[in-house]
Image: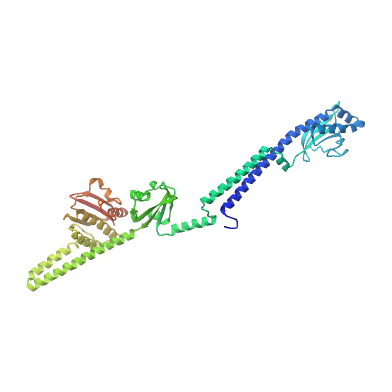
């Protein structure tokens, strides 16, 4: 807690200040209104008192006869006592006061200020803090022979407050009590909502959260119960291609594939869900967030596994090639023993024929495929297919020279995925798979056909969707190979499709 107190106490203090200031303003307004009402009411009453005195015949006669001016005092005192005014003063036409007691002594000039009484008209106003009425005394000839002044002292500010109606004071007191209680309740609610954290702590928490979100190597996306994005760090925005105004928008309104929507909304349950987005392979995990047993949203984390998948594919290709070479080494040893035996038997013609047959069989994979990576992949896939009882052969029309590294890597992925899919389709049936890789102008054509049952017409487009698989009983990552193939072709500006022609025929075109 700082020197100025906690946030809750500061809020309480300021709220009380505002409430008290508001009530003081209301009280002051009430006093001003009461003073205005007092001035209006008392002004009329003082005018009536002064008129009663001024129209008395004895007052007119005494002012007209200087010898009788001593008789004016009883009239003034009678008017004051009967009306309850603070004073009633009678002055002659020269403003000389003729009657005590009053604010002035006998013989002193009467302060008339802006009064119009000496001009023959009554006047009501405020002089020296009192409400005063001046009424002229007229002679029989219509001349002003004197002035009657009746006054009532105005109450002070605090006197006005004390003189205010009891109901108004009670209402101000009730309002003050309501304001104080409301401030206390609001303070408690603010303290509860902020979990007792002070402004400095809240600021530090926000700064730490921002640093954590944007500093982590994983993408983080926050969603509310309506699947609207509440936060997204830089890695998530880049990996998912989120627009700048994504926060606050529902994921259904964004340009997301069905697979990605299923993972973000929780329809696709499970850990390490694999999603393709913009040519990248993403692994996503969705975790629901609950507060006091109520789900308030979810957090989705994602990792880019594109490079890892590429390395895994290369590792698989190298492993298959190693296994194939190991098997071939064993086979070559047997062949060398056979050649050695034929030589010892003197069957030289058989030796030449045997060597010729071996050379033809080994050279058939080299015909038309000069790119080392693609050629090595096909050799490895041939050995793998043979182990599963599938015959893998090259189309005689295959022609592929050495291509650049990027295209070679993409061809390895595309050819490998299509061959794996075809081998899976005919494995155990003694079928065959045929591969065509050929350069056609500014693109490379890849055709993989098999002798399997083909693809059902209703799922021709679905087979390329991320997550689609016909191997529902098997576990592991399924439905990724063909989807990744399609992503690579589209990224390079090419196409991939499938048709049935005595089996499935997959065709891919990859521009240079």
Q: Quadrant of residue 376?
A: bottom left
Confirm whether residue 70 shows in the render: yes
Can you give x and y, in whole percent of width and height, for residue 186 in the image? 56, 47
- The residue lying toward the viewer, choosing from 68 and 237, is 68
* Residue lying farthest to the bottom in this orientation: 344
Residue 402 appears at what percent x and percent y?
25, 62
Q: How is the image coloured?
A: rainbow
Is residue 372 visible to the viewer in this orientation of the structure? no
Q: Residue at x 71, y 35 (%)?
A: 37
Q: Quadrant of the N terminus?
A: bottom right
| Furthest residue toward right | 67
Q: Position of residue 257 (x, y in %)?
A: 34, 49
Image quadrant where residue 70 sits: top right
Q: Is residue 363 above or below residue 202?
A: below
Q: Quadrant of the C terminus?
A: bottom left
Which residue is situated farthest in the left direction here?
A: 346
Please say if 146 is above or below 480: above
> How many callouts does the rendering have?
0
Residue drawn at (58%, 47%) of the image: 183
Question: Residue 263 placed where, x, y %?
Answer: 35, 51
344 above or below 31?
Answer: below
């Amino acid at each position: 807690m700082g020197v100025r107190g906690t946030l809750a106490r500061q809020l309480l203090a300021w709220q009380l200040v505002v409430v008290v200031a508001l009530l003081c303003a209301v009280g002051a307004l009430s006093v001003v209104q009461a003073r205005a009402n007092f001035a209006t009411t008392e002004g009329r009453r003082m005018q009536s008192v002064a008129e009663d005195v001024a129209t008395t015949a004895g007052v007119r006669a005494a002012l007209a006869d200087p010898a009788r001016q001593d008789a004016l005092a009883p009239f003034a005192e009678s008017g004051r006592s009967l009306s309850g005014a603070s004073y009633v003063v009678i002055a002659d036409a020269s403003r000389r006061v003729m009657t005590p007691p009053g604010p002035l002594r006998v013989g002193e000039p009467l302060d008339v200020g802006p009064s119009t009484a000496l001009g023959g008209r009554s006047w009501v106003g405020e002089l020296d803090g009192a409400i005063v009425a001046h009424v002229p005394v007229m002679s029989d000839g219509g001349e002003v022979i004197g002035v009657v002044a009746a006054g009532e002292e105005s109450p002070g500010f605090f006197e006005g407050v004390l003189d205010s109606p009891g109901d108004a004071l009670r209402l101000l007191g009730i309002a003050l009590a309501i304001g104080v209680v409301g401030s206390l309740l609001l303070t408690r609610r603010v303290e509860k909502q902020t979990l007792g954290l002070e402004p400095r702590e809240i600021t530090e928490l926000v700064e730490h959260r921002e640093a954590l979100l944007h500093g982590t190597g994983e993408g983080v996306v926050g969603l509310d119960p309506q699947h609207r994005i509440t936060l997204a760090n830089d890695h998530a925005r880049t990996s998912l291609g989120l627009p700048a105004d994504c926060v606050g928008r529902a994921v259904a309104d964004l340009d997301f594939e069905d697979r990605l929507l299923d993972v973000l909304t929780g329809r696709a349950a499970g850990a390490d869900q694999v999603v393709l987005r913009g040519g990248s392979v993403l692994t996503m995990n969705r975790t629901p967030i609950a507060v006091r047993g109520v789900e308030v949203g979810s957090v989705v984390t994602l990792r880019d596994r594109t490079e890892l998948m590429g390395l895994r594919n290369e590792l698989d290709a190298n492993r298959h090639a190693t296994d194939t070479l190991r098997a071939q080494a064993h086979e070559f040893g047997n062949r060398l023993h056979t050649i050695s035996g034929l030589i010892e038997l003197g069957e030289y013609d058989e030796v030449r024929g045997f060597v010729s047959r071996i050379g033809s069989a080994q050279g058939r994979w080299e015909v038309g495929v000069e790119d080392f990576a693609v050629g090595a992949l096909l050799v490895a896939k041939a050995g793998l297919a043979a182990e599963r009882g599938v015959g893998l052969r090259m189309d005689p029309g295959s022609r592929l020279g050495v291509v650049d590294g990027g295209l070679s890597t993409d061809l390895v992925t595309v050819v490998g995925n299509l061959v794996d899919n075809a081998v899976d389709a005919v494995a155990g049936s003694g079928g065959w798979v045929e591969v065509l890789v050929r350069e056609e102008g500014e693109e490379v054509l890849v055709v993989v056909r098999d002798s399997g049952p083909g693809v059902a017409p209703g799922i021709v487009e679905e087979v390329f969707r991320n997550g689609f698989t016909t191997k529902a009983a098997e576990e592991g990552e399924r439905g990724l190979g063909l989807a990744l193939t399609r992503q690579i072709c589209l990224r390079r500006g090419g196409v991939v499709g499938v048709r049935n022609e005595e089996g499935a025929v997959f065709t891919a075109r990859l521009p240079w």
